[in-house]
């Protein structure tokens, strides 16, 4: 029954134009970045290496597909949560707004399973989004720009990774990025369980992400104690795969925190939905 | 009295002439190389840059054509590979002053300080430690207008007859690198966890092998995009 309901939920997602709007927007954004890099990528590289260029010269095929993929991932990981929340944010509250939630609750399936099927359908949509993003970023960029070593820009320096040591990092990085987006999906569905309208949970999800991201970006020591527990801090942990050596301890810590967030958010949504007085 | 005064006035010029003669021997040796290609392995130990050893092929042609071809990313010093040879080749653009003798790795070397005569030269001052017996530059310390000071130590192998080194170790100054976390999108790093590299000097070791000298490299090679 859970499988059938998940299928139904996924069909509902696909029937909404906004689901394709997200994929379309993502495609357009990535193609725009690729076009910009093709047109003026050298100046971007110069920006990256400028601090060292007084004394050092960087030789080789720097502007390559891997660098473009990394830039795309870095730029869009901030915006993709909006596209995820746009679809998953009204999975429960949308039904309440449209008045179909009462009918949904009459189906011979527990409320827990209804919520779970919505989470799974949201997870599948998020997976499709990140796979599409990965295809455009890594495969299409490689096709246009070729391959080569990757320069990774961190706030405290540069890491240069050799070509043969990169693909697995993208694979692992995308997996962690997916887990981060899954947390956004879970958050928006959880907020959706508390709301009666479609737009509220979407806006609330983005507000939370923006707030937490700003706290994470601020170099103020007073926030250092809470930063490790904000899921937005760990949304960028996919970058840790692009360090040398890879700090697996930090990555596992981030994965753990994201998994805990997901479990708590799902549990909270189930708890709320089971106690929800469905009157609409 | 006049004779004594003349001797005293001419004394520095005698020293200048001697050092120029030593330098001329080095330059003559360098000038025997019209072009070369060489395989290089670069090991960079630079603060705030993590990079594994990388390989490349370097091409040089008199007077100042220089090209690095590599599949991967190779970091080299901005100056120090061929600039000093190019600079020294035009004797009208500098004056050389002989300094002390000392020992570097058991080799007696003569310090020659080279000062550019023009205002527009990129090099402000160059110190060369020269092994006079083999007419080889063992160490250089070059200060330029835009790139700071770079110290280079040279080791020679079987291409010493052309004054081409088998190993070069560059010591370079690196400025503090800091990029806002928002630009680097490195928000995962927590401020208290930063492992700042406080060093301001870095080393680049270049091992050179498989020299091909005076093979008549075409100018086209240096125009092609690597």
Image (cartoon, rainbow, N blue to C red):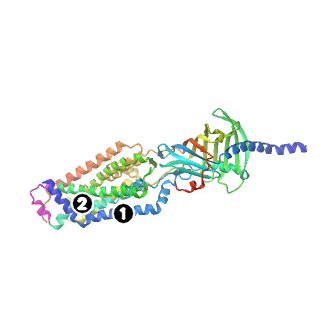
Q: Is residue A58 magenta?
A: no
Please state the total of marks drawn on the protein image: 2
Q: Verify whether residue A114 appears in magenta.
A: yes
Q: Which residues are magenta?
A: A100-115
Q: Quadrant of residue B221?
A: bottom right
Q: Which mark is residue A88?
A: 2
Q: Secondary structure at mark 1?
A: helix
Q: Chain of mark 2?
A: A
Q: Quadrant of residue A115?
A: bottom left
Residue A205, given in percent of the width and then of the height, sits at 28, 59
Label 2: how many residues lie within 10 Å, few (<14), some (14-19) or many (20+)?
many
Q: CA distance from mark 2 to mark 1?
A: 21 Å
Judge by depth and name the residue closer to the eye, A269 or A27. A27
Residue A29, labelled with which disc?
A: 1
Magenta stretch: helix, strand or loop mostly: helix
Answer left or right for B51 relative to A239.
right
Q: Residue at x 25, y 62 (%)?
A: A87
Residue at image position (39%, 57%) is A143
């Amino acid at each position: 029954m859970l499988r059938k309901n998940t299928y139904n939920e996924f069909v509902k997602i696909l029937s909404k134009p906004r689901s394709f709007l997200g994929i379309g927007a993502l495609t357009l954004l990535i193609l725009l970045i690729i076009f910009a890099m093709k047109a003026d990528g050298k100046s971007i590289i110069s920006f990256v290496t400028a601090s060292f260029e007084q004394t050092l010269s960087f030789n080789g095929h720097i502007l390559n597909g891997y660098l473009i993929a990394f830039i795309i991932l870095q730029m869009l990981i901030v915006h993709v949560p909006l596209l995820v929340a746009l679809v998953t944010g009204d999975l429960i509250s949308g039904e309440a707004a449209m008045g179909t939630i009462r009918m949904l609750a009459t189906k011979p399936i527990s409320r827990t399973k209804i919520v779970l099927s919505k989470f799974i359908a949201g997870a599948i949509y998020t997976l499709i989004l990140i796979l599409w993003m990965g295809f455009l970023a890594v495969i299409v960029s490689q096709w246009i720009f070729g391959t080569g070593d990757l320069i990774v820009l961190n706030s405290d320096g540069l890491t240069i990774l050799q070509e043969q040591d990169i693909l697995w990092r993208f694979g692992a990085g995308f997996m962690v990025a997916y887990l981060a987006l899954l947390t956004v999906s879970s958050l928006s569905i959880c907020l959706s369980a508390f709301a009666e309208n479609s737009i509220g949970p979407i806006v609330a999800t983005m507000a939370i992400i923006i707030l937490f991201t700003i706290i994470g970006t601020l170099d103020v020591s007073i926030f250092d104690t809470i930063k490790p527990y904000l899921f937005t801090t760990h949304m960028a942990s996919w970058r840790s795969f692009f360090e040398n050596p890879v700090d697996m301890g930090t990555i596992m810590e981030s994965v753990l925190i994201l998994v805990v967030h997901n479990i708590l958010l799902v549990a909270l949504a189930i708890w709320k939905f089971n106690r929800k007085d469905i009157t609409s | 009295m006049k004779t004594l005064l003349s001797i005293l006035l001419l004394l520095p010029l005698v020293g200048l002439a001697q050092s120029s003669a030593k330098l001329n021997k080095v330059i003559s040796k360098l000038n025997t190389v019209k072009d070369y290609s060489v395989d290089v392995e670069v090991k960079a130990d630079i603060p705030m840059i993590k990079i594994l050893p990388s390989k490349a092929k370097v091409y040089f042609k008199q007077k100042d054509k220089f090209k690095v071809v590599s599949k991967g990313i190779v970091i080299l010093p901005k100056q120090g590979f061929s600039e000093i040879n190019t600079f020294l080749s035009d004797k009208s653009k500098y004056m050389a002053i002989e300094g002390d003798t000392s020992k570097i790795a058991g080799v007696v070397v003569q310090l020659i300080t080279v000062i550019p005569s023009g205002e527009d030269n990129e090099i402000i001052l160059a110190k060369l430690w020269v092994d006079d017996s083999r007419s080889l530059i063992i160490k250089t310390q070059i200060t330029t207008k835009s790139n700071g000071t770079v110290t280079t130590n040279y080791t020679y192998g079987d291409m010493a007859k052309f004054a081409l080194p088998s190993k070069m170790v560059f010591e370079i100054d690196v400025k503090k690198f800091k990029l806002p976390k928002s630009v680097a999108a490195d928000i995962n790093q927590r401020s208290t966890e930063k492992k700042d590299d406080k060093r301001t000097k870095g080393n680049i070791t270049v091992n050179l092998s498989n020299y091909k000298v005076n093979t008549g490299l075409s100018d086209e090679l240096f125009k092609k995009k690597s």
